[in-house]
Amino acid sequence: MLLFNLFDDWLANNASYSCFLRLMLILRALHVNNERAKMILKPDKSVVTKPNHIWPTLTDEQWLKVETELKNLILADFSKKNNVNVASLTQSEIRDIVLGMEITPPDVADKTIDQIDKGGKEANNLQAVTTKTTNIHGEEIVVTTKSGYEQQVFRSHTDWRMRALSSTNLPQRTKQIYINSDDLKETGYTYVMPKNLLKKFITIADLRTQIAGYMFGTSPSDDDQVKEVRCIVMVP
């Protein structure tokens, strides 16, 4: 049996938190640039990896150098993707970037703050709207709204009312049933479907939801290529 530790033997000379940060640094660098990170971890043939270790065997001084290069690799990738100068980042932002947190570039953050401030000013300029409604008990309810979201009309994404009205026309569709003969093959099976079963299957359907069922039937004794459908079983 072989046992592997992601920290290798780092815990002998380092604290567990330092080992965790080193591991996160390696994994982030491998995610950002796999080939470059491998070259940093193992720059030449003199660096070996022990049989029971996962990472190269380095001294504490070598690990300090490797960690610095891995951090620079991660920051360079972030700087290239977001067009940000690394020198403008704070220590907390650098720590978050190294640990994998999504950091918003300063210019994008400033733009988002401006949009929020602008939206707040527009909300203050809205006029108060008073709405009178009557509930099922005949009581009159007066509501005064000032913000924009309070004046929006609720609309269901499923549009259940329109779907319910459209479903009432499904029985009318059973009067005009035809089969597309373009895809038929003489060598395939011939299915005999009872009309009442087909009508029932259509009327319980929905316009936006696909339904399916298992067909069960038998074949006549004189022709096994014909399948007479006797029932349809639908999964709840």
Image (cartoon, rainbow, N blue to C red):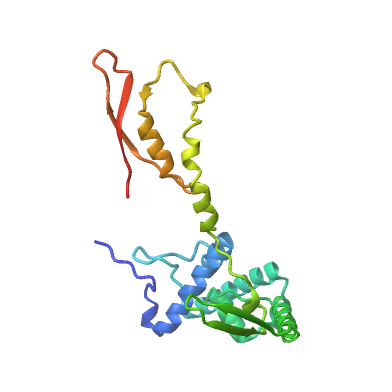
Is residue 14 in sight in this rendering?
no
Apparent side of residue 48 relative to residue 124 in the rendered image (left or right): left
The x, y position of residue 176, in whole percent, is: 51, 30
Residue at the image position 36 percent from the left and 24 percent from the top = 192
In this view, the residue farthest toward the front is 138
| Position of 12 relative to 56 (above/below) | below
Is residue 223 in sight in this rendering?
yes
The x, y position of residue 84, in whole percent, is: 72, 75
| Position of 146 relative to 161 (above/below) | below
Q: Quadrant of residue 37?
A: bottom right
Q: In this view of the protein, which residue sits in the foreground, 35 or 217?
A: 217
Disc tally is: 0
Residue at the image position 54 percent from the left and 58 percent from the top = 159
Q: In this view of the protein, which residue sits in the foreground, 112 or 122?
A: 122
Q: In this view of the protein, which residue sits in the foreground, 153 or 191?
A: 153
The x, y position of residue 41, in whole percent, is: 52, 67
Q: Quadrant of residue 15?
A: bottom left
Residue at the image position 71 percent from the left and 83 percent from the top = 123
Q: In this view of the protein, which residue sits in the foreground, 165 or 58?
A: 165
Apparent side of residue 152 relative to residue 17 in the rendered image (left or right): right
| Position of 156 relative to 124 (above/below) | above
Residue at the image position 68 percent from the left and 67 percent from the top = 81
Apparent side of residue 125 relative to residue 102 in the rendered image (left or right): right
The x, y position of residue 105, in whole percent, is: 68, 76
State which quarter of the image contains the N terminus. bottom left
